[in-house]
Amino acid sequence: SDDSVRVDKQDGYVVITLDRPDKLNAFNEAQHVSLKAALVEAEEDPACRAILLTGAGRGFCAGQDLSERDPSQGEIDLGLTIDTWYNPLVRRIRSIGKPVICAVNGVAAGAGANVALACDIVLAARSAKFIQAFSRIGLVPDSGGTWTVPNLIGEARAKAIMFTGEPVTAEQAAEWGMIWQVVDDDDLMAQAAGLAASVAKGPTRSLGLMKGLIQQAGDNTLDEQLDLERDTQREVGKGTDYAEGVRAFIEKRPAKFTGR
Ligand code: T3D
């Protein structure tokens, strides 16, 4: 790992910043290594109860660093780089049992867009854009985009933005339900930090289980999902946060969750 990813530990949460602003934080191998290390550490750290991912400079992430790619020098096995880096990254974000918030501070293109959209709650600066840039270079969307994007905004819009590579503004993305919220550029980091601090004080175990339930819903029938909710409720109901939550309600005071 190197200095291409910054990690700032805050009270209850960790801010992970992609930090190669001259390249709009495009992924090279070193940045993948550093991001993986940062996410693994945040996942394993019990003091970390939420993760905030963002980018330094005027972009969030421009996807794969194309200066590492030169197909004219012989065939490159893109399947291998996807297996090694992009797929594990998306699987990690989706399986971490803590909220992962993404503050899209500027352009998010290619895998950069789809990594952002794999996060649990996405805020974007008003000036940010989402670009499914793959068609411009003769590829297909990766990092889960062909699954995530149509799930979020439907096939009609997904196909149009993917075939054309047309930028989607933050406002449009929010209107379509592709992201949670648009925030004025100057307020983005304060809003995102406030959200991270607030969810970090939440019942982390239930939030992690909730994330899993929501993500599994698409594969299940309603009957299966009802059973899964029952089983999950049975488990989470044994936790100290449930006991505290009910006690706080009865005592008419805010709950003080510990995440267990
Ligand atoms: O290969 C595999 O492992 C397979 C996996 C693929 C996943 C992918 O992500 S494929 C898609 C790769 N990404 C792209 O195709 C996006 C390329 N970038 C752009 O289209 C534009 O840069 C943007 C639309 C994102 C932003 O445009 P703009 O005009 O605001 O900025 P710019 O001037 O184009 O970029 C600023 C600098 O960043 C510039 O460098 P320079 O000229 O100042 O030295 C530019 O070359 C550099 N940069 C931007 N994106 C990339 C990049 N350098 C390398 N790779 C990039 N992806």
Image: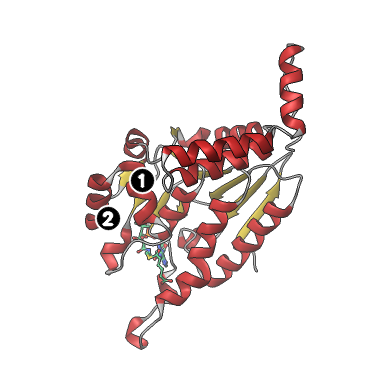
Farthest residue, direction bottom = 74
Residue 170: image location, x then y, percent: 37, 40
Q: Amino acid at mark 2?
A: Met
Quarter residue 171 falls in: top left
Q: Would you say the beta carbon of the disc 2 residue lies within 8 angstroms of ligand 1?
A: no
Residue 195: image location, x then y, percent: 59, 33
Q: Nearer the viewer, residue 133 or 158?
A: 158
Mark nearer the N terminus (1 vs 2): 1
Mark 1 surroundings within 10 Å by alpha-carbon count, few (fewer than 14), some (14 through 19), many (20 or more): some
Residue 82: image location, x then y, percent: 46, 70
Quarter residue 248 falls in: top right
Q: Secondary structure at mark 2?
A: helix
In three-dimensional space, the C-alpha distance between marks 1 and 2, rounded to whole angstroms, equals 14 Å
Indicate which label's residue lies in the foreground, 1 or 2. 1
Disc on res. 92: none
In the rendered image, the quadrant that contains the N terminus is bottom right
**What residue is rendered at 66% in x and 59% in y?**
40
Q: Amino acid at mark 1?
A: Asn
Disc on res. 151: 1
Image position of 3 with respect to 174: above or below: below
Q: Quadrant of ligand 1?
A: bottom left
Residue at the disc numbered 2 = 162
Q: Secondary structure at mark 1?
A: helix
Mark 2 surroundings within 10 Å by alpha-carbon count, few (fewer than 14), some (14 through 19), many (20 or more): many
Residue 57: image location, x then y, percent: 51, 51
Quarter residue 164 falls in: bottom left
The answer to whether any part of residue 107 appears in the image is yes
Q: Would you say the beta carbon of the disc 1 residue lies within 8 angstroms of ligand 1?
A: no
Image mark count: 2
**What residue is rendered at 77% in x and 32% in y?**
240
In screen coordinates, is 23 left or right of 98?
A: left
**What residue is rendered at 72% in x and 54% in y?**
44
